Amino acid sequence: MENGLFEVPGDGHEMLCFDLAWVAIEDARGQRSLAHSAGVEMPGVAVSAAKASCFSKTAGSEVARVANQSPSSDPVDPQDPHTYLTNGLCSREELLLSALRIALGQMKCKSTASGGGGM
């Protein structure tokens, strides 16, 4: 698994930055499957802070630092800002498990197809 920030053009000239993970699995025969998670948009200020530190701190740690300054906020985990950024709807774990299920399903489909029972 590898997480990363991916920039995509937004409105006008601004770039939006999404955090997503790539999952790679391999079976005993060497058959591989890849899938990526859904991307969660990271606030531009958090991405800028991470870049300014040459990524010695992460965008997620900056999201947590800012969010945790609010006394009315539940603590934000710097390893899982996704829960906070999706208002509690999607944790990092859920995103990773979804990508893993997709990769596994694709691998099983390929395996079935090569055995004559699938696509």
Image (tube, grey):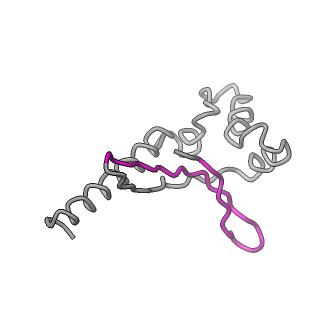
Report the side of 16 relative to 52 (left or right).
Answer: left
User: Considering depth in this image, is 50 or 40 the residue closer to the camera?
Assistant: 50
| Residue 13 is inside the magenta segment | yes
Against 47, residue 106 (above or below) is: below
User: Considering depth in this image, is 28 or 77 the residue closer to the camera?
Assistant: 28
| Residue 78 is inside the magenta segment | no
Give the image location of residue 69, x and y in percent.
74, 29
Name the residue rendered at 54%, 49% in the picture. 21
Residues drawn in magenta: 3-28
Q: Residue furthest bottom?
A: 12
Q: Residue furthest right?
A: 52
Give the image location of residue 8, x and y in percent.
66, 66
Secondary structure that dominates the magenta span: strand
Against 53, residue 111 (above or below) is: below
Name the residue rendered at 45%, 50% in the picture. 24
Give the image location of residue 80, x and y in percent.
57, 36
Report the side of 81 relative to 23 (left or right).
Answer: right
Give the image location of residue 35, x and y in percent.
44, 56
User: Considering depth in this image, is 62 or 105 the residue closer to the camera?
Assistant: 105
Q: Residue furthest front?
A: 29
- In this rendering, the count of numbered labels is 0
Report the side of 19 relative to 97 (left or right).
Answer: right
User: Considering depth in this image, is 119 or 47 the residue closer to the camera?
Assistant: 119
Name the residue rendered at 47%, 43% in the picture. 90
Name the residue rendered at 58%, 39% in the picture. 84
